[in-house]
Image (cartoon, rainbow, N blue to C red):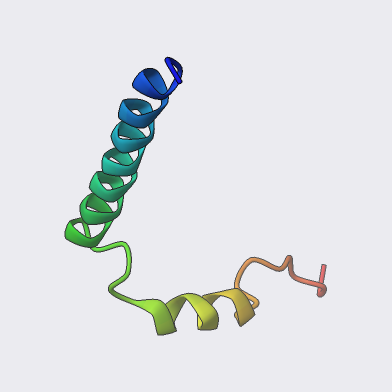
Amino acid sequence: MDVLVYLIPIALGLGFLGLGAFLWSLKSGQYDDLDGAKWRVLSDDDLPDRDR
């Protein structure tokens, strides 16, 4: 039972750390353009030219 004294604050700290990281990602605009990412994956801009 003594280990719960350590595990509960660690679990709460990690939970708040994860929540803070999620809120930071929302604030920094990580989820603004979800549709653009799926189209960028399908574009062939990075393929080398085959005409050479």
Which quadrant is home to the C terminus? bottom right
Outermost residue toward the left?
Answer: 27
Vertical placement of 35 versus 15: above or below?
below
Image coords of residue 37 (percent x, y) = 47, 75
Q: Quadrant of residue 12?
A: top left
Q: Residue at x 73, y 65 (%)?
A: 48
Vertical placement of 23 versus 42: above or below?
above
Closest to the observer, 34 or 3: 3
How many numbered discs sit on the rendered protein? 0
Residue 27 appears left or right of 5: left
Closest to the observer, 49 or 9: 9
Q: Residue at x 81, y 75 (%)?
A: 51
Residue 38 appears left or right of 17: right
Closest to the observer, 51 or 40: 40
Which quadrant is home to the N terminus? top left
Vertical placement of 31 versus 9: above or below?
below
Closest to the observer, 43 or 22: 22
Image coords of residue 10 (percent x, y) = 36, 27
Q: Residue at x 52, y 83 (%)?
A: 39
Residue 10 appears left or right of 16: right
Image coords of residue 13 (percent x, y) = 29, 32
Q: Residue at x 71, y 68 (%)?
A: 47
Outermost residue toward the front?
Answer: 1
Residue 46 appears left or right of 15: right
